[in-house]
Amino acid sequence: MTSKTPRTGNQYSIHYGDYSAVICELGAKIRRFDYQGKEIFCPFGVNDLTPTCNGYVLAPWPNRIENGEYDFNGKHYCAPVNEYHPAPRNNANHGYAYHYMWKLESLTDSAVTLSLRFPNLDGYPFDVTVTVTYELGDNGMTATVNARNDGDEPAPWALG
């Protein structure tokens, strides 16, 4: 029997002092975060796809876009609606970043950096690359997020 890659992708473990964390490739999600061997928040299994967006990077927008429609820089865009319940919701919810496997940029004992270049998506045709670094230190975990617009036009972007 061969081992399969978990549904959440590769798992990146980092440690520093009494802190440890596991970040997964899918959505650059914080899957586990522990202090002195105790869970800081509810961990998720390697094959668990959480029904909420706990621990994921939410970009290029957090929260909801009503009817999936928005205007930016004089143009109208329609993102796919992916939130229907509880009725009467009809929103584009939490962007696209949590749907994709992120690329590993670097991994050390105490830090991991992942990146995602958004493909040309319905409702978000902008060429934006997002990079997130999770680093453990004396005071716990720090997340540093950067977004770079590689396109020729301004691009809307937000983080949650």
Image (cartoon, rainbow, N blue to C red):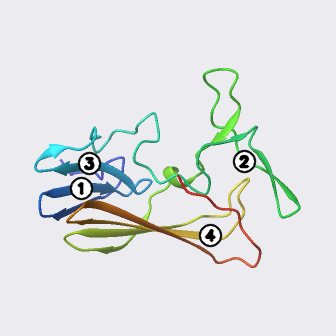
Q: Please tell me which residue is depicted at 72% across the width and 53% down the height of the picture.
A: 122
Given contact means CB atoms under 8 Å apart, are the residues at marks 1 and 3 in contact? yes
Q: Which residue is mark 3?
A: 32
Which callout, 1 or 2, points at the residue further toward the start of the chain? 1
Q: Please tell me which residue is depicted at 71% across the width and 31% down the height of the picture.
A: 90
Which callout, 1 or 3, points at the residue further toward the start of the chain? 1
Which dot marks residue 79? 2
Q: Please tell me which residue is depicted at 70% across the width and 76% down the height of the picture.
A: 151
> Which mark's residue is nearer the viewer, 4 or 1?
1
Q: Which residue is mark 4?
A: 128
Foreground residue among 73 and 102: 73
Which callout, 4 or 2, points at the residue further toward the start of the chain? 2
Measure the C-alpha gap from mark 4 to mark 1: 27 Å
Neighbourhood count class around disc 3 (C-alpha, 10 Å): few under 14, some 14–19, many 20 upward: many
Q: Which residue is mark 1?
A: 21
Image position, residue 97 (x, y; %): 53, 55
Q: Is residue 130 left or right of residue 35?
A: right
Measure the C-alpha gap from mark 1 to mark 3: 5 Å
Measure the C-alpha gap from mark 4 to mark 2: 16 Å
Q: Secondary structure at mark 2?
A: loop
